[in-house]
Image: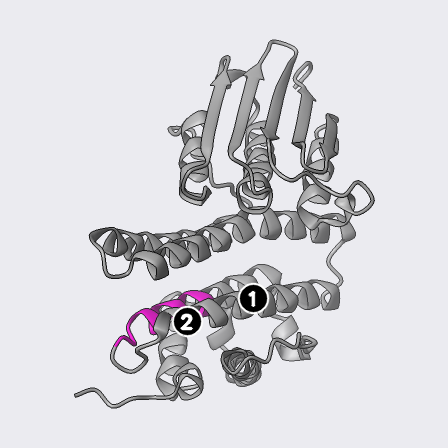
């Protein structure tokens, strides 16, 4: 019989930290190459795990991130972010393997993973400020982390919700496999973002990518319609990547926050421009507060960087409509 281990001890166990170090060494991460850097990094990792352990007991108090020390700053922003992403994956795997030691591992994961995600994002932001990253790059990192990584973690949590509802059914086993895949995708997304890549390979069409994302995120019973018309070959790589990020974020908001029965995303690629409309019949947004949302601000900023136009109309109980238009002439 497997001995019970408390959730707090499970999160802060030496085995987890040892596994994390081993994975960093396998990746030849700069974090573990210098003993002084690793000593400081390990201390900050323990602080993060302490925050996660406290969240299990219901303490959701946000923690102020510690600024990186001089040794850690030499690692660089990209390597540091990849190392934090590896910590997220290590903790996720650790929880998944702890079936006997933590019978309530689903509740544990539901508390720990969002807490860890927020703490890591705070560390990345603090690191970017400390190393005096140019404002343009800081904003780009913030957009990519919010739109790409945030949506991947949201998808993983959605899979966890489904598993908790259907854990004793055949569908529950599929949900568990989907959860593991979603966490792997979140980890891979961080790596791709920090290498300046995007998550839409050219051998996967925009419509297929958007439909797969929407189907994975949408609650049961929601009618989802997705279509893309026109020649995708007309889209420059930058426009294609940004358009995918914008529409994904709009879909995620509509499917997870609007309480809608129907959500649609339609795009048309014309010779001179590309136009996309995402619409839902949900609860609508408060006009006085709508632009405070990081997701809406990010969508508008991405569109404007492409010299495009972003419009949103929303009314309480009448749904929300987002219209994006990006010129293609001269690209």
| Residue at 55% in and 53% down | 150
Where does the image place residue 197, in percent across and percent down from the top left?
A: 52, 43
| Residue at 45% in and 41% down | 218
Where does the image place residue 34, in percent across and percent down from the top left?
A: 51, 79
In the image, which disc is placed on residue 107? Answer: 2
Magenta stretch bounds: 87-99
**10 Å crowding of disc 2: few (<14), some (14-19), many (20+):** some
> Does 190 appear above or below 131?
above
Q: Is residue 24 within the magenta segment?
A: no
| Residue at 74% in and 64% down | 129
Which element carries disc 1, helix, strand or loop?
helix
Q: What secondary structure do most residues of the magenta stretch adopt? A: helix
Which of disc 1 and disc 2 is earlier in sequence? 1
> Does 9 appear above or below 181?
below
Disc nearest the viewer among 2 and 1: 2
Where does the image place residue 290, in percent across and percent down from the top left?
A: 75, 44
Residue 40 or residue 59, whichever sits in front? 59
């Amino acid at each position: 019989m497997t001995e019970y281990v408390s959730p707090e001890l499970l999160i802060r166990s030496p085995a987890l930290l040892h596994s994390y170090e081993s994975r960093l060494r396998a990746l030849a991460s700069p974090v573990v190459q210098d003993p002084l850097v690793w000593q400081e990094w390990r201390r900050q990792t323990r602080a993060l795990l302490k925050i996660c352990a406290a969240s299990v007991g219901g303490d959701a108090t946000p923690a102020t991130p510690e600024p990186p020390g001089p040794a850690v700053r030499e690692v660089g922003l990209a390597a540091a972010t990849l190392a934090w992403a590896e910590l997220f994956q290590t903790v996720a795997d650790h929880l998944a393997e702890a079936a006997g030691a933590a019978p309530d591992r689903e509740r544990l994961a539901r508390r720990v993973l969002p807490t860890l995600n927020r703490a890591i994002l705070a560390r990345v932001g603090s690191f970017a400020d400390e190393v005096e990253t140019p404002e343009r790059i800081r904003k780009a990192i913030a957009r990519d982390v919010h739109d790409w990584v945030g949506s991947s973690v949201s998808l993983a949590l959605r899979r966890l919700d489904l598993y908790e509802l259907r854990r004793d059914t055949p569908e529950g086993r599929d949900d568990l496999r989907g959860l593991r895949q979603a966490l792997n995708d979140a980890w891979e997304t961080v790596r791709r973002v920090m290498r300046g890549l995007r998550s839409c390979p050219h051998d996967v069409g925009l419509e297929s990518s958007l439909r797969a994302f929407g189907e994975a995120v949408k609650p049961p019973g929601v009618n989802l319609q997705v279509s893309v018309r026109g020649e995708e070959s007309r889209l420059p790589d930058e426009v294609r990547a940004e358009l995918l990020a914008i529409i994904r974020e709009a879909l995620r908001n509509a499917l997870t926050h609007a309480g809608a029965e129907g959500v649609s995303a339609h795009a048309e690629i014309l010779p001179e421009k590309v136009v996309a409309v995402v619409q839902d019949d949900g609860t609508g947004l408060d006009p006085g507060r709508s632009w405070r949302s990081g997701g809406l601000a990010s969508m508008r900023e991405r569109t404007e960087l492409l010299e495009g136009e972003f419009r949103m109309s929303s009314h309480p109980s009448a749904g929300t409509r987002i219209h994006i238009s990006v010129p293609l002439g001269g690209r």
